[in-house]
Amino acid sequence: MADRIEVLPLEAFPTQVTENIRYGDTDRQGHVNNAVYATYFESGRVDLLHDSLPLLEASGCQFVIARLIVDYVREMHWPGTPVIGTGVLALGRSSATLRQAVFQDGICTAIAENVIVLMDMKTRRARELPEMIRSDFERLKLVAAS
């Protein structure tokens, strides 16, 4: 088994979004079902990408997910308002690696690492990250933990 993803404090994430846990998000064990976390991570990614999405769509490109790895750290229960932190970990030619975490009451409940790839919507092939996106992503890199 691969090593666990490093847990970072909420303050290390340059973007943060709050969600509400719905009663229907829980399973028979009374905790939030593991599949729901993918939706929380999606909310965090959309929040991080929000400013660049109109420009990308105008150029005929969109980000797609190539990889998502999740480590579940502890249970999360209803009711609650988890905070999803998202930041850029690394940049590739046509991709970005993001680190994300879900926190409930200040405690990390899950962490994820995912790779998003910029795709040309006509050719369905990866396209190199434009300089505008690179500079945005540099600004959204994770803050080093002290």
Image (cartoon, rainbow, N blue to C red):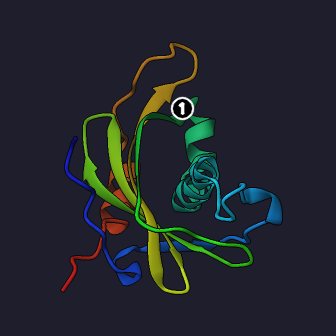
Q: Is residue 104 above or below residue 112?
A: below
Task: Decide: few, some or many residues near mark 1? Use Cα within 10 Å; few <14, some 14-19, many ≥20.
Answer: many
Where is residue 108 drawn, in percent x and y?
43, 74
The image shows a total of numbered marks equal to: 1
Q: Nearer the viewer, residue 30 or 86?
A: 30
Q: Estimate the x, y position of residue 80 in percent, counting from the top left.
A: 69, 79
Residue in front for this viewpoint, 121 or 30 = 30
What x and y, as percent, mark residue 62?
Answer: 55, 35
Q: Is residue 25 left or right of residue 91?
A: right
Where's residue 28, x and y in %? 72, 55
Q: Residue visible at 50% across and 75% down?
A: 103
Amino acid tagged 1: Cys
Q: Which quadrant would residue 93 be assigned to in this image?
A: top left
| Residue at the spot of label 1 | 61
Name the residue: 33% across, 34% down.
94
State the image quarter where residue 95 is shown.
top left
Which residue is located at x 60 percent, y 72 percent? 17
Quadrant containing the N terminus in the rendered view: top left
| 39, above or below 64, in the image | below
Query: Element under label 1?
Result: strand
Residue 37 placement: quadrant: bottom right
Residue at x 51% of width, y 34% of height? 64
Q: Residue furthest front?
A: 29
